[in-house]
């Protein structure tokens, strides 16, 4: 079974966090005086194998975002995670950060 964990995560991540493109459009539509975007880009890529402790954490829905995932996707992801654990598949991890600062008319930070 092949599951793209990043694609599955993106499907649900936008239900709890704002999309940077939408925030930029918001700033343009409302003609905010000041907009600063700090894009920290993607951290260097790291590789790891899944630990037994992480499997337990996922099984117990130890992160709040797991409660947002519908049961079918959760079970599919968990089965793939267990399979990758058994095979000691190397997982590639990357993430990035972007901060967006907005100022209303006449307000400066």
Image (tube, rainbow, N blue to C red):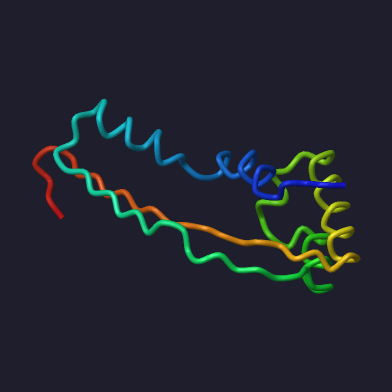
Q: How many circles with numbers are drawn on the protein?
A: 0
Residue at the image point whose x is 56% and y is 44% from the top:
16
Query: Where residue 57 appears, x then y in whole percent?
Result: 78, 66
* Residue at the extreme top: 29
Q: Looking at the rendering, in which quadrant would you find the C terminus?
A: bottom left
Residue at the image point whose x is 76% and y is 70% from the top:
49
Q: Quadrant of residue 51?
A: bottom right
Above-or-below relation of 78 to 35:
below
Query: Where residue 9 appears, x then y in whole percent?
Result: 65, 47
Residue nearest the observer in this picture, 3 or 60: 3
Q: Quadrant of residue 88?
A: bottom right
Above-or-below relation of 13 to 58:
above
* Residue at the extreme left: 106
Query: Where residue 2 appears, x then y in whole percent?
Result: 82, 47
- Whether residue 24 sits left or right of residue 36 in the image: it is right
Query: Where residue 31 appears, x then y in whole percent?
Result: 19, 30
Residue at the image point whose x is 60% and y is 68% from the top:
46
- Whether residue 15 sits left or right of residue 63 in the image: it is left
Residue at the image point whose x is 65% and y is 48% from the top:
6
């Amino acid at each position: 079974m092949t599951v793209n964990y990043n694609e599955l995560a993106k499907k649900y991540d936008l239900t709890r966090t704002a999309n940077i493109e939408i925030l930029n459009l918001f700033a343009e539509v409302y003609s905010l005086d000041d907009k600063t975007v700090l894009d920290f880009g993607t951290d260097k890529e790291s590789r790891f194998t899944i630990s037994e402790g992480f499997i337990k954490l996922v099984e117990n829905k130890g992160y709040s975002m797991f409660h947002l995932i519908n049961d079918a996707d959760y079970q599919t992801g968990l089965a793939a995670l267990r399979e990758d654990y058994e095979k000691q598949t190397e997982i590639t991890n990357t993430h990035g950060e972007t901060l967006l600062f907005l100022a209303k008319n006449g307000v400066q930070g």
